[in-house]
């Protein structure tokens, strides 16, 4: 329509010239070029380990800045997932870039393990780990709550690392500038080419397809991978991505300070918002929002409609007297509301994202992140790993969190100096995460999932990312999709259908062009082989299923059929 309209003045001018009057008008505007077609990547082909596993470390010795410490046979069934034996594989361990810090005197290295199936599917999976890293978690490539399968079980070669520091250091590895950078993004950049070379030597060919996945901080690693080295991976699977982790950590301390204002015991922030009170608010949210998707089934699919319909101020009873768990005091409402609307500085500047109200607010996984993490985890992260300069030692985390200036913390995560030349907001976060032409144009795909009840990394932040990708790319849903999981907390759990195999969907999308218009997720009720979720509500079928829909679509009830079956729901605007 725009092109047609823009030609009308030109045609009129041409008519005047033909009749001997007027003058040449301006040329018509050039319409925007259509994005190039997205290439279809080919399917990976299987391979087999060449030679003996026990000889592998010695045979492949010589990678730059790398020591392979061992290669060991792992028999089939040594590891299991969902009651199934993981096939036989070769475990290779090693270290990269060993050094002694000139800043704190500690020894550092990027320690890793890579598990190589004897019968390989031709694919490589980089496993991004959670928290502040520091441990080489078993390299299996698990995704979703209580997984029934994972990347290793499927035949991927899987890498896991400690991201360049030992867990025994706690947050104090942040004193060393290089350890900060390795944790942020450089360890992955160093490990990736080494791992691909190792696979080429082990199997006689490099991986045909490479995938990067993880949840929480692991999801942040995924975002950094597609933003910083899009040429290295074909598929990205990010769960609960803390891609603005420094901001989220400051926001969580902000929340801790708010809870402290109404806590009856400052040593226990949960006394500011008790289990009974959280359950009361969750019930009020359900009462107001559950049926907005067409079914009163204990799951709030329409997050945006709930945002418009639920009010903490008016939909939760204000205590007429003493707090008794069935209401919130005026002071509590005043303290808690800003946590959900989004942390701010003293001048009202936003720090992080808002958080949606959801049915999982009363779940058992909430208290750790809301009441313990601010003083015991986020304090060390903000004060030592992210701040420039880092806090002086000895460091009192609880005092820092409960009495420190939020404004100063927010400023410190963007600061630099001669020793710490990259700020936390530089080394922890992906540059330009919504400008994804390099991912798109090589045929790679991104899938992101996020629990709506996640209390530490907000589903609203992931929605903001998806909105930005759609703004920058007219064909965004052809290569990048977000799936919200109602009721689910941080990575798993809560009153949710949190068991799903999104890796299978990602491989199908990358290698076969099968668009993931929905992903079927299951509840983990009694008898679930991946592990029972104790928070599956009593009224649900043990194996209830739901479609996870690509944002901004919502799983809406079709009007008939079982409320425990995904077939009764469809993804709609």
Image (tube, grey):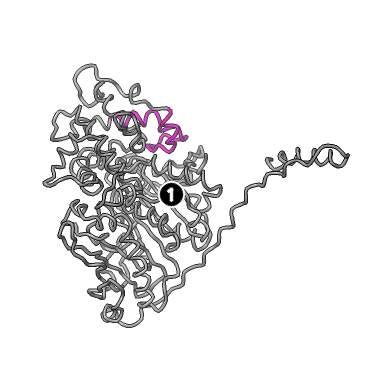
Residue 240 visible somewhere in the drawing: no
Q: Quadrant of residue 96?
A: bottom left
Q: Quadrant of residue 168?
A: bottom left
In front of the other: 496 or 423: 423
Residue 300: % across, % down: 40, 36
Q: Which residue, as the protein is rendered here, is positioned at the far left? A: 394
Q: Which residue, as the protein is rendered here, is positioned at the far top? A: 320
Q: Is residue 140 above or below residue 275?
A: below
| Magenta-drawn segment | 280-308
Residue 440 vs residue 433: left or right?
right
Residue 59: % across, % down: 29, 81
Q: Is residue 116 above or below residue 305?
A: below
In front of the other: 503 or 293: 503
In front of the other: 500 or 444: 444
Task: Label 1, secondary structure: give it.
Answer: loop
The total of numbered circles placed on residues is 1
Residue 53: % across, % down: 29, 78
Q: Is residue 288 magenta?
A: yes
Residue 545 visible somewhere in the drawing: yes
Identify the residue under disc 1. 432
């Amino acid at each position: 329509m725009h092109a047609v309209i823009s030609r009308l003045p030109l045609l009129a001018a041409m008519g005047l010239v033909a009749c001997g009057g007027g003058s040449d008008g301006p040329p018509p505007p050039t319409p925007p070029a259509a994005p190039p077609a997205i290439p279809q990547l080919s399917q990976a082909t299987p391979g087999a380990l060449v030679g003996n596993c026990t000889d592998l470390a010695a045979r492949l010795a010589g990678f730059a800045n790398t020591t392979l410490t061992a290669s060991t046979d792992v028999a089939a069934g040594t590891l299991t997932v969902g009651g199934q034996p993981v096939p036989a594989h070769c475990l290779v361990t090693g270290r990269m870039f060993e050094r002694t810090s000139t800043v704190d005197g500690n020894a550092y290295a990027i320690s890793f393990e890579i598990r190589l199936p004897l019968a390989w599917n031709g694919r490589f999976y980089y496993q991004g780990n959670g928290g502040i890293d520091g441990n080489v978690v078993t390299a299996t490539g698990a995704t979703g709550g209580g997984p029934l399968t994972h990347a290793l079980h499927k035949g991927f070669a899987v890498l896991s690392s400690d991201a360049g520091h030992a867990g025994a250091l706690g947050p104090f590895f942040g004193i060393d500038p290089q350890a900060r950078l390795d944790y942020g993004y450089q360890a992955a950049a160093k490990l990736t080419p080494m791992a691909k070379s190792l696979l080429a030597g082990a199997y006689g060919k490099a991986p045909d397809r490479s995938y990067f996945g993880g949840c929480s901080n692991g999801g942040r690693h995924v975002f950094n991978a597609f933003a910083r080295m899009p040429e290295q991976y074909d598929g990205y699977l990010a769960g609960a991505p803390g891609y603005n982790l420094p901001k989220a950590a400051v926001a969580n301390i902000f929340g801790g300070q708010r809870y402290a204002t109404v806590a009856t015991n400052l040593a226990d922030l949960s006394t500011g918002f008790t289990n009974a009170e959280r359950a009361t608010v969750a019930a009020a949210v359900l009462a107001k929002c559950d049926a907005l998707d067409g079914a009163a089934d204990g799951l709030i699919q329409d997050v945006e409609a709930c945002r418009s319909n639920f009010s903490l101020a008016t939909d939760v009873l204000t205590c007429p007297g003493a707090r008794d768990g069935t209401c919130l005091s005026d002071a509590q409402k005043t303290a808690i509301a800003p946590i959900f609307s989004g942390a701010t500085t003293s001048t009202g500047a936003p720090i992080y994202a808002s958080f949606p109200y959801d049915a999982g607010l009363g779940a058992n996984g909430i208290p750790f992140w809301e009441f313990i993490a601010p003083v015991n985890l986020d304090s060390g992260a903000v004060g030592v790993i992210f701040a420039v300069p880092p806090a002086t030692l000895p460091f009192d985390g609880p005092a820092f969190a409960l009495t420190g200036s939020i404004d100063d913390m927010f400023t410190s995560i963007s600061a630099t100096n001669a020793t710490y030349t990259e700020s936390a907001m530089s080394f922890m976060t992906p540059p330009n995460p919504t400008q994804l032409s390099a991912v798109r144009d090589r045929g790679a795909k991104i899938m992101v999932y996020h629990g709506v009840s996640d209390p530490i990394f907000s589903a609203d932040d992931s929605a903001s990312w998806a909105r930005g990708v759609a703004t920058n790319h007219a064909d965004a849903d052809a290569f990048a999709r977000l799936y919200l999981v109602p009721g689910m907390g941080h990575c798993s759990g809560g009153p949710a259908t949190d068991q799903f195999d999104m890796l299978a969907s990602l491989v199908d999308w990358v290698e076969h062009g099968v668009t993931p218009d929905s992903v079927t997720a299951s509840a983990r009720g009694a008898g679930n082989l991946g592990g029972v979720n104790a928070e599956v509500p009593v009224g649900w079928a043990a194996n209830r299923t739901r479609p996870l829909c690509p944002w901004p679509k919502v799983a809406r009830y079709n009007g008939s059929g079982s409320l425990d079956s995904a077939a009764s729901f469809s993804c709609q605007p």
